Image (tube, rainbow, N blue to C red):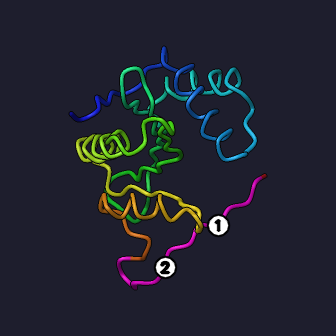
Amino acid sequence: MVAPVRRATVDDAEVVAALLHDFNSEFDTPSPGTAVLAERLRVLLAGAETFALLGGEPAVGVALVTVRPNVWYPGPVALLDEMYVAPRARGGGVGGAIVDRLVADCRRAGVSAIEINVDEGDVDAQRFYERHGFSGVDPDTDERAFFYSQEL
C-alpha cells in the first residue's frame, strides 16, 4: 500500500517543525528547536513560495520546498530544501510517495525544474534520488553538478 501524502497547511507547522528538528538531531546538525521552526513555518507555509508535503498517517516523512522564478526556464524552479523520513519508516515507500507527489504537484503548477542539494557522502540519498529520475550531472555537459553556499 502506498503511503498517503498530503500538502501541509499552516496548522501543520508543528508537525513539519518536529520532523525537521528530528532530521537535524539524527545527523548531529544544530537546530533552533521545534518552537522556532514552527514559528517560521507558520509564516512560510502561509505564503506562495514555500510548501511542505507530509507522508504517512500520522506523518513520518516530510519534504520542504521553495519555489522561485528563474531566468533560464519558462516556469519557476523548485528547490527541495529538506526531505526526511523517520528511521522507523524508511524502506516502506514513504519517501518515494513523497517524491512522486512532489513531481506531480510541480508539473501541475508549471514548475520547469526541481533542484536538490545532496551531501557528497550521502550515497543513499544520491541513489534514492537517481532512482526517482534526478541526476547529479549537468544535462548539457555531463559534468558533475556542485552546490556552493555562504552563510551570511
Measured as percent of width and height from the top left, residue 37 is found at 65, 28
Determine whether, in the image, residue 139 is placed left or right of residue 150. left
Tell me, for residue 144, which label it has, or none: 2
Q: Dot 1 surroundings within 10 Å: few (below 14), some, or many (20 or more)?
A: few
Determine whether, in the image, residue 20 is placed left or right of residue 54. right
Tell me, for residue 148, which label it has, or none: 1
Measured as percent of width and height from the top left, residue 9 is found at 43, 20
Measured as percent of width and height from the top left, residue 103 is found at 29, 48
Determine whether, in the image, residue 2 is placed left or right of residue 138. left
Tell me the amino acid under the disc marked 1.
Tyr
Above or below for 11 versus 33: above
Label 1: which secondary element: loop
Determine whether, in the image, residue 125 is placed left or right of residue 40. left
Label 2: which secondary element: loop
- Residue 144 in magenta stretch: yes
Q: Residue at x 28, y 45 (%)?
A: 100
Above or below for 23 versus 11: below
Q: Dot 2 surroundings within 10 Å: few (below 14), some, or many (20 or more)?
A: few
